[in-house]
Amino acid sequence: MKRSAKIIYVMLLSMTLGASAAAQQASGPYIAARQAALAHDYQPAADYFARALAQSPRDSVLVSQTMTAFLASGDVKKAHALARLLVAGEGSYPLAEVLVLSEHFKRNDYQAALDHLEATTVVGRAIDELLEGWALVGLGQMAEALRRFDAVIPVEGMRSFALYQKGLALTLVGDFEGAAASFSGQGQAAPALNYRGSLVWAQILVQLDRSDDALAFLRDFHGSGADHAVNSLMAQIEAGALVEFDLLRNASEGAGEVLHLLAQALQNGEGQDGLLLYTRLASHMAPRNMQAVLLSAQLLEQLGNPQLAIETYAQVPRSHPAYVQAELGRAQALQEIGEATTAIEVLTQLAGSFENLRSIHMTLGDFLRQDEQYARAVRSYDRAIALIDQPARGHWYLHYVRGTAHDRLGDWAAAMRDFDRALELAPDQFQVLNYVGYTLVDRGEQLDEALEMIQKAVAAQPDAGYIIDSLGWAQYRLGFYNEAVVHMERAAELMATDPIVNDHLGDVYWAVGRKTEAQFQWRRALSFAIDYSGPEAVDPKRIQRKLEVGLAEVLAEEGAAPLKVADGD
């Protein structure tokens, strides 16, 4: 499937790469449009392309580029209008063909969809046959539709894809036995399932009065990572509630599943902006497929367009089980654009509506902690921890982050209780070992134990600059200056622009008498401190004072014990 999918991907994107002479001459709007498109800022790109198109309305390449930008921005209606112009003219425009086809399916005009597919190659031969199958399902020609699906099964790399589509088609006519046979592999290996496929298979099993099998499958497939939608389905099944098959209701939605699955299959190997076109079309043909909406939003985040991702996440209705995942994604995107207060409000409302979902309280706690609202963060973590039924290794994180919040509030005793619990659950967890070891060193407490903790963390993560910095700093505080130099230099190699690491290296150099090098490192630390936004505080005034009078004088001014500085420079 990878080879066929790659060909399809190239076909879909090829029209966006060329620029005709007429378009290039439409200076201002066209240049702005190209810049916006390259930045994946699709809404402004569509607007600018449309302005350029008004100056060169007969330029087919410009029509194609405008169409692509409108589709990426989510305005399928405008994209389709331009697609019809391209299909009616000369030249080959694969994306326009797919758009016109999607509109046939959207209007449930299955004969037009079939005619279109038979007249030209739209996506690729194997994918086109699956789409023909769905058009035939819509026309009520089920036997012929199944023959089309079966014809794709032997195609290299297409077996799972075709079996899944065939199984879905059978659910539309109520043949859940046949659907189960298809999902089971028709006597051979079962097709690989993705997240949405797991929901489909579970619902099929329920229709066959195999509720226990459905529950066992969902638990095995999702494990501890089950989200709200999966847990809601499992709760319904466990309660014996009526669970109808509701993931597909017509052939248009089935055709949308083809494009959605294609985008997922390509997600880890191709450019994300091309995949976005698939998910936009999938959502257009199957508007109830919220997984396609979520995938569009996630792709937009990966492409660096959080604002459009926010708008896309907001398309998931509150009544849908995917709403929780959408709101969590929307909050993350809001934080990316600097709207931390709004993001926290989104999560606060979500936590109020879904009081028993641990993941929401944990995420809210993380956002509050990052916003330095440590007391509120602790309360959110308290709620998340209270919702743990059976403590497991993976729960170390909640105790760790609550411990860091307690530490920021100045309650070290409460922090250590959490850190101890985190290490009970995960004794070799390097983040906890490093944090506790480094903090003990900074507090001047239990230095030998702190050094041992950090050494364990370094053994687990030998290339983590911030942990090696902790080791060097602990050795420095213990007076092992020469050993500290080795590790601090290594940390500076790994984190060359980190102001804290450079500041520490300066102190260590001073301690061994390398004063010129120490001053150089302090100057570097000072230059990097301007843009620093890490978890630890940087004190530029203290660094500047060390440059003026040296470390020994600064320590004396602070009432700290003097260093034993080596002779020479």
Image (spheres, grey):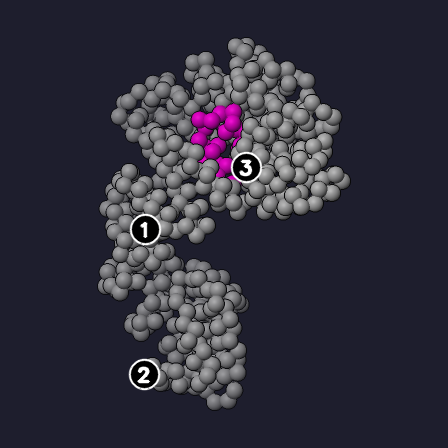
Predominant secondary structure, magenta span: helix
Instruction: Judge the density around disc 1: few (<14), some (14-19), many (≥20) Cα neighbours within 10 Å.
Output: many
SS for callout 2: loop
Q: Quadrant of residue 207?
A: top left
The amino acid on which the numbered mark 2 sits, given as a three-letter code, is Gly
Relative depth, front residue between 167 and 531: 531
Left of 435 or right of it: where is 187? right
User: Which badge, 3 or 1, is on the more N-terminal residue?
Assistant: 3
Q: Is residue 246 above or below residue 36?
A: above
Q: Percent from the top left, x then y, of residue 517? A: 53, 80
Residue at the image position 33 percent from the left and 64 percent from the top: 436
Q: Nearer the viewer, mark 3 or mark 1?
A: 3
Q: Quadrant of residue 475?
A: bottom left
Does the CB distance between marks 2 and 1 fall below 8 Å?
Answer: no
> Which residue appears farthest toward the bottom when viewing the image?
567
Left of 525 or right of it: where is 355? left
**Per the image, is 154 magenta?**
no
Mark sitting on residue 73 = 3
Count of numbered labels shown in the rendering: 3
Find the distance from the CA under tag 2 to the CA under tag 1. Answer: 37 Å
Relative depth, front residue between 285 and 198: 285
The amino acid on which the numbered mark 1 sits, given as a three-letter code, is Gly
Q: Which residue is mark 2?
A: 559
User: Which badge, 2 or 1, is on the more N-terminal residue?
Assistant: 1
Q: Percent from the top left, x then y, of residue 296? A: 50, 36
Relative depth, front residue between 138 and 38: 38
Residue at the image position 44 percent from the left and 85 percent from the top: 549
Q: Is residue 439 above or below residue 361?
A: below
